[in-house]
Image (spheres, rainbow, N blue to C red):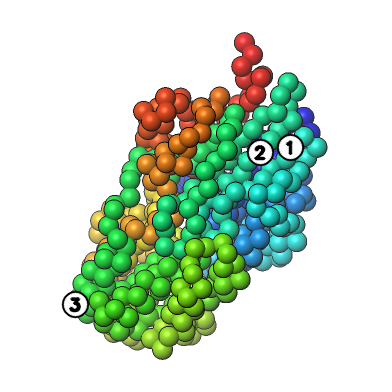
Amino acid sequence: MESEGGRVLFDCGLFQGERALRRRNWQPLGVPPERIDAVVLTHGHIDHSGWLPRLVREGFRGPILTSPPTADLLGLLLYDSAKCQMEDAEYANRKGYSKHHPALPLYEEHDVDQTLRQVEVVDRETWFETCSDVRCRLHDAGHMLGSSYVEVEVNAPGRPQRLIVSGDVGRYDAPLYNDPLPPPPCDVLICESTYGDRDHSQVDPLDELEKIVNEAVKRGGLLLAASFAVGRTQQLVYLLRILIASGRIPELPIWIDSPMAVEATHVFRRHAHEHDLSEAHEEGVAEALSAPWVRMTKSAEASKAINHEEGPGVVIASSGMMTGGRILHHLKRRLPDPRTTVLVTGFQAKGTRGRTLLDGNPTLRIHGRDIPVKAAVRRLDGLSGHADRHEIVRWLTGMPAPAQVFLVHGEPTAARGMAKQLETSFGWKATIPAIGDSFEIGDAAAAP
Ligand SMILES: [Zn+2]
């Protein structure tokens, strides 16, 4: 956003999914990075934060302003992202399957070092300046630990303009997080639309998970759960613990094949007031993560040792959309085995391996090879961190009509679905911008 006083960037994510999209990660930003005054970061997910080290590498030197838990998680997420990219590039070079010679990482660990030095923590509900005529404050969005939406006030000529930048909006009554706070009135609403054409199933994730695990046990092989290390893994282990404790599933070995998941749990514990688990519940998570049937595998050797396991058992590894990480090695080995069950959790972007599996593709391409899919593929819907169509409407209910509404962060059908719903529910006309579009806001927008 550009004003008289300067420029502020809201979020700076990595493109994930289809190759055409991922290629955009290599294109320069529309604005020279050194001319951006500040970045306001809504939350730590890589599709919102993962391009920051590249931005810094290309010359951004301003502050990255975000909530305390997001600042705490950011190091974990960005170092992991850097590592994945360095490994992928290295692997591609070793196996010679990349079209680029040599394949290069988008950024490296030292770029993350510098990025983290530019992070400045801001408390929620507190105004802070990003440049002389713009101030912002963060409100809990309930989407993941630390997630916020941004209220922006631009001291524009005429009268101040208020914007809401939704980031990702969370759900109501989600297992781990607070409900999203109701947004204040605004002139311009920029809202996500990830699930804009859908509603989540009303099934209790505990019931769903119970069924999936018992089926997997009957099938006899391992259950491979592709999961984000931060948030989703803690939710999964916690739900498994409840199921085991209540005798709804047998006591199984559970491998958390992710050093990051352990670290993330510490961050959850440090910010107890940021999620709605009671103290007892919080202890429950910690206990679950150290119970005798939960095995942490930090080293690559320990991870490889899982190859010798026959099952039944559960392996939780990242990444959630199977775009990288240790899950790929397990998939490569176990997908051709009909005793295997693959559990897909959370949103799967078009073009990701997670989506390909859900679409029922008979093979899956991993590290340049087409692996036959004989495993059973199941999805667990109840843990999505994103508000669905009706939860977005619930979030916006009571807000006076903004002068301008923009829908972002959704695939085209989802964004159109959300636009239709906003029109039906509130009579609002929403714009779905294309990448590179620019818009005037405030009185200039209304001028003939
Ligand atoms: Zn997110």
Residue at (38%, 59%) from the top-left corner?
383
Q: Is residue 67 visible?
A: yes
Task: State the CA–CA distance, disc 3 to disc 2.
Answer: 53 Å
Q: Report which residue position mark 3 lands on.
A: 218
* Percent position of residue 417, x then y: 37, 35
**Kind of residue sitting beneath label 2:** Val
Q: Can the viewer see residue 88 in this picture?
A: no
Residue to which mark 1 is pinned: 134
Quadrant where the C terminus sits is top right
Question: What element does badge 1 sit on?
Answer: strand
Q: Is residue 312 left or right of residue 178?
A: left
> Identity of the amino acid at label 3?
Lys
Q: Which residue is mark 2?
A: 152
Q: Is residue 202 left or right of residue 297?
A: left
Q: Which mark is residue 64?
A: none
Farthest residue, direction bottom: 292
- Alpha carbon separation for disc pair 1 and 3: 59 Å
Q: Earlier in the sequence, mark 1 or mark 3?
A: 1
- C-alpha separation, residue under disc 1 versus residue under disc 2: 7 Å
* Foreground tag (3 vs 2): 2
